[in-house]
Image (cartoon, helix red, strand yellow):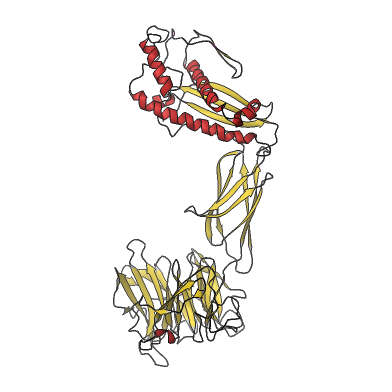
Amino acid sequence: MKSILGIIVIIHLGLCGCSTSPKGEATAEGNLGGTVNTSSDEYAPFRHNEKTLLFSSTNREWQGDRKPMEQASYFSTQTSEGFSEPRFADEFPLEEFAGSGYPSLYTNPITKQKELLFAAPLQPGNPKPDVDIFYAVKKGNTWSKPIPLPKSVNSEVWDSQPFFAPDGSYFLFASDREGGIGGIDIYKVYRTQKGWSDPVNIGDTLNTPKDEFTPSLSNDGALMFASKGYSKRNDFDIIITDATERGWVNARTMPEPLNSEYNEVNAAVWGDSLFFASDRAGGFGGYDLYRFELCGPVIVSGKVNTLDGAGASGTITTVDVTGKVYAQTPVADNGYFRFNVPSRRYLIVRYESPCVPGRHEKRITTPCDEASAVALALEFNVEKKDFVFTFEKYDVPFFVGGYYLPNTTENLEALRLKFSYGLIGNDDSTRYIEKPGTEYNNYAFSVDSALYDAYSFIAERLELLDNGVCTDDNKELTITVTGFSDPRGIYEKARYSATTIDDNAFDFHMERGAPMTNETLSALRAYFTAKWLQTKIEQLESYRKYKKKILWRTAGKGIDADEEKDDSAKRRVEITIALSKKGKMP
């Protein structure tokens, strides 16, 4: 393989990655098919972009009317019927470099500038060629003229198979230069402010006295290469390692059918698949391209524990940081769940339930085991909490200063009429109520929207009373509205001037003429808000169905002590919904 540098071919990859061919059929498992694989050598498959696979070949029949070259570039598009015949492409500036191959590309995510590394012999046809690594940059639509890397990187012997790191900070290559561990070794070259560092041998924990070459890297930094030094057979096997902060560790031979008694080289990760080249029996001749699943499945199972013993039925959704959904599965009432996800992913596992407020998350990194499935266990410990609606997104006062009816457009108009008729605001008993200015017009529109949101919030919670959703049918829903006031003082002569309230259903009682304090005011705000919501929501069929299981409660908390709020924003209410066993107050 040392003298093979290859023709470059680009394929648009579909779902299967395999096809039949008029030239015959491959019998070897995982073979990509006879339109791409030929009696020549196909090897060095690499991912070029989202839908395109880049690989090399020694086939010259695809060159058409061109002067036959040892290496050239081609495209082949996958259709529903398989791969199309490859066609010549001029994607890379390699035509003048006879024998060139193994291109590796890096795109700067900020400048979008592309960089290219490839290898080419200085004297094509020489049985012991001096192969060097060349570099080019694409600015706009034009590649710069490729130039060899400095002599500090290239040697006077065989230097080939460069591969950029995912972040472009270094590249790997293979060389049989003197001073190595033995045979062909893999070397690392760092990018520096002045260019490229001197090559560094990756060490005898990876390189062996035998040959190691065709290095490649996955997006998570795992190193793969071909080696004769990890088995007793004298064939090349694919070796994979794990990336750590200390370097690559745990070098191991990949299992069958990825490796075989024949040669396997040029491993490259594409999503959950591994592409590689092999001269195993059952192909089309020479080296063919193959595709297998890289890792065994990752099986995630676990349980949601509700600390109060309530049912845990809900949904587990697994997404990545972009929001892409990888799995969604129901959680049984006993809390158990199970689902499969891809390997080599950083994922967010979310538990949501109509019975449990909020969204509960766990973060996992799914491992890869080339030989078997991987089992992961997750546990959510969920403490029962009440559902709370706080109106926080509405940054307006919900009540006119000193007043107890929510500042809806209807209540605001009625309050202004009371001022105009002199019903309030003219004596000491009601002078604590603010006469609303024009700014309350806009506030009222926000309060209308906020109360509608609160109505919807309560309506959605009514499903908690459905039999079997959260617990058994012996349960009640308690809706508590809590009121608050701002820290403005209320003088001693202030009184509640409206009609006496004697509401047993709400367990609320207020005599006309009762002294007005901040505690009284906050309690009235809670009561009148709760009555507004009840009047609206009792029109729902679901409310009428469960009316006997729904309890309304109000509470006045007096002055809101939150120092981060403006005083006007402290004139507010909040809503709490609790599910409890019948007859037991939450």
Q: Main secondary structure of the magenta part?
A: loop
Residue at figure coordinates x 61%, y 19% from the top left: 505
Query: Could you say where residue 318 lies in the image, as x and y percent from the top left?
Result: 55, 52
Residue 250 in the image: x percent, y percent?
Answer: 56, 69
In depth, the one of 252 and 266 nearer the eye is: 266
Residue 269 drawn in magenta: no
Q: Could you say which quadrant of the image residue 25 lies in?
A: bottom right
Is 508 drawn above or below residue 129 in the view shown? above
Exactly how many numbered labels are in the figure? 0
Image: 273 above or below 544:
below
Residue at image coords 58%, 23%: 553
Give the residue drawn at x 46%, y 86%. 2
Left or right, 159 with reference to 31: left
Q: Nearer the viewer, residue 201 or 122?
A: 122
Residue 93 in view here: yes
Q: Quadrant of the C terminus?
A: top right
In terms of depth relative to the viewer, which is nearer, 535 or 4? Answer: 535
Q: Looking at the image, which residue is at 40% across and 12% down? A: 418
Please indicate whether residue 12 sits to the left or right of residue 281 in the image. Answer: left
Residue 492 counted in the magenta span = yes
Q: Which residues are magenta?
A: 491-501
* Nearer the observer, 442 or 184: 442
Residue 173 lies left or right of residue 580; in this view the side is left
Residue 68 placement (x, y as % from top left): 38, 89
> Whole-percent x and y of residue 236?
55, 82
From this viewpoint, is residue 205 visible? no
95 relative to 571, above or below: below
